Amino acid sequence: MKNFITALSIIALSCFFASTALAKKITVACDTNFPPFEFKDPKTGKHTGFDVELWDAVAKELGLEYELQPMDFNGIIPGLQSGQLDVGIAGMTIKPERAQVIDFSDGYYTAGLLLLVRESSTDINGIEDLKNKVVATKLGTTSVDFLKGNTTTKETKLFPNNDAMFLELISGGADAVLFDSPVVSDFMMKTGKDRVKVVGPLYQGQDYGIGFPKGSALVGQVNSALKALRENGTYNALYMKWFGTEPK
């Protein structure tokens, strides 16, 4: 009987601490500029996008209070490692080396890499043509690793945000941009319309995941919420809103 009572006490305490952890206001990092996943709305001055609205839906599903913290992408993983951040959602690819230092949710978006060049370009048709070329991409992303492992460039210019790397291409400071497919497609259809084009295939299919400090109790809760959002249609509605198509 004593053992039984002790076991019940441990379970009760575990539930209390778990509920307390989920009740506190948490800090959620997103990228400062990664459209259509996260960006500042010029009309409201607030950050929005697929990631931002998906996290808000997850938080409502779990009854979580949170503060959104936009920041440079390359600061998110260190912030999770140090415990200064509770969650990171920023189009973050689930990679083995990252999974060694932070925990990930289940994948919530499947993307790849696209090669973007100026509309007038004729000598780049794929990554095999990047030898002796200047390529721009974003600091701390899988694009950097892919370039290092699959081609030899004259120079790889790394930028902290999307706007800078795209501007480098438009201004002639780079011959190409290699980056995440949804972001490249969004730029090509809007700001870069009739000025840039995609060449070559979709490279390196990859899943985005929500990041957490190692051992976070939120991982299982968030996975359950993501599943529920898929089942009740919320995920599909957000996907259609931001990408104009049903999720595959």
Image (cartoon, helix red, strand yellow):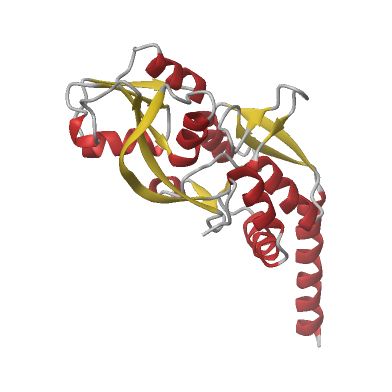
Query: In the rendered view, does 114 fall on the left or right side of 20?
Result: left
In the picture, the quarter occupied by the N terminus is: bottom right
- Residue at point 80% right, 58% down? 19
- Along the viewing direction, whichever of 138 and 234 lies nearer the viewer: 234
Q: Residue at x 53, y 50 (%)?
A: 209
At which x and y percent is residue 152? Answer: 19, 29
Q: Which residue shows up at 23% across the image and 25% down it?
A: 122
Instruction: Tally the numbered discs.
Output: 0
Return the x and y of residue 51 as percentages of the image width and height. Answer: 63, 43
Residue 233 in view = yes
Q: Is residue 60 above or below residue 38?
A: below
Q: In the image as oriented, which residue stretches furthest toward the bottom? A: 1
On the rendered structure, is 234 left or right of 119?
Answer: right
- Residue 191 lies, in percent from the top left, at 53, 23
Q: Quadrant of residue 20?
A: bottom right
- Give the left or right position of residue 91, taking residue 144 as reference: right
Q: For this rendering, which residue is in front, 13 or 177?
A: 177
Name the spot of residue 132 as percent of width and height, x first.
17, 21
> In the image, is residue 26 above or below residue 219?
above
**What is the quadrant of residue 80 in the picture?**
top right
> Residue 196 appears in which quarter of the rendering?
top left
Q: Is residue 216 above or below residue 168?
A: below
**Is residue 87 at least partly visible in the picture?**
no
In the visual, does 37 lie left or right of 44? left
- In the displayed structure, 112 sits above or below 236; it is above
